[in-house]
Amino acid sequence: MRLNEKIKWRFCQLLKFHFPFLWSKHLYKTTLGKVTNFRNPKDLNEKIQWLMFFTDTSRWTSLADKYAVRQYVKDKVGEKYLIPLLGKWDCADDIDFESLPTKFVIKPNNGSYDTVICSDKNDIDLEKVRERMSYSLANKFGYENAEPHYLNIKPCIIAEELLETDDAGGLIDYKIWCFNGIPHSLFVCVNRDKNTHHADFLVYDLNWTKRPEILTPKFRNSNECPKPNNLDEMLIVASKLSDGFPQVRVDLYNIQGKIYFGEMTFSSNFGMMPYYTNEALLDMGRHIRMPQRSAKEKITTFAKRWFPYV
């Protein structure tokens, strides 16, 4: 590695692990090719960035926690929407694989990419799963993509029942965008790869009209997804869970008419989504009512932007 490359790499590491606000600016420029508009945020990406660094995100932390959010869901919409919990451990060495059924899903509560889907634990290297979970606990999610609210989650490991479907495209993710508690549209993921987590994207409005023009040409495709019979119930669930937040994406599953809660995402694609068109991002941004901040919040968020770990 050349000297200038080493210096650049060291500088990026400094920003990534010590100055998430500056790291986010760098990522925004390299990912989307433009400077983040913090002075007058307009589109969805800009407003996510502004909310992440200029407002109190302590509730984001508690609800992005895949274990802690279960209590919130239970209180707001009922336990029936939760995927059954099979176990919870604070240390990878404590995982009791013998107590788990043949099929299960295991994941850290504070990440997005380390989920392990086990279709048959007799055909999987359980020690490698343990190592992967151990790595997840030791390497906090949030540094890489400048999402500091994840860093405050107390990490643990959870196992849940494996959701199975007979649908040809596999399990479908219904990601419902909500602004100030009002559902706006559905970002639907089909044909998801179990290993890479890559999927085909579709966008539907609340009447289940496909809106391919909302996606950039690179992400458009000819796939279709049938309208869930209980779409109205899904929208009610999303509305109740998102109430009180300027923006949040509520992710749900729907298997043979039974709705399951997936997660709440406050910084979708770390607030740098390349798959929506500029027009769509601006339209979605216009639906967000930005909060009025108190003097205390302005001071505390200013301090956290520039001295996050003091």
Image: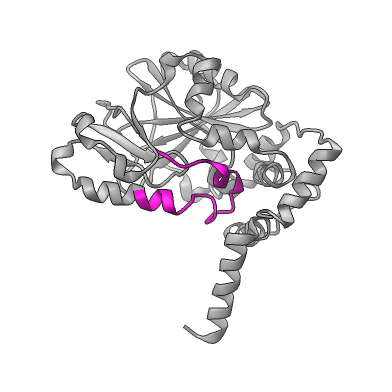
The answer to whether residue 109 is magenta is: no
Can you tell which quarter of the image residue 229 is in?
top left
Q: Say which quarter of the image contains residue 295.
A: top right
Compared across the picture, whether 229 is left or right of 29 comes to: left
Q: Would you place residue 140 above or below residue 47 in this image?
A: below
State the image coordinates of residue 218 (x, y, percent, origin top left).
48, 51
**71 or 22, which lies in front?**
71
Magenta residues, as a range?
134-158
> In the image, residue 278 lies at what x, y percent?
64, 46
Name the spot of residue 101 as percent of width and height, x first: 21, 29
Foreground of the two, 31 or 139: 139
Look at the image and tell me in which quarter the C terminus lies.
bottom right
Q: Name which residue lies at 43% across and 18% down.
A: 81
274, above or below 188, in the image: below
Residue 184 picture location, percent across and down: 61, 27
The image shows residue 48, relative to residue 259, as above or below, that is: below
Q: Is residue 30 visible in this depiction of the protein?
A: no
Which residue is painted at 45% across and 54% down in the image?
A: 139
Residue 8 seen in render: yes
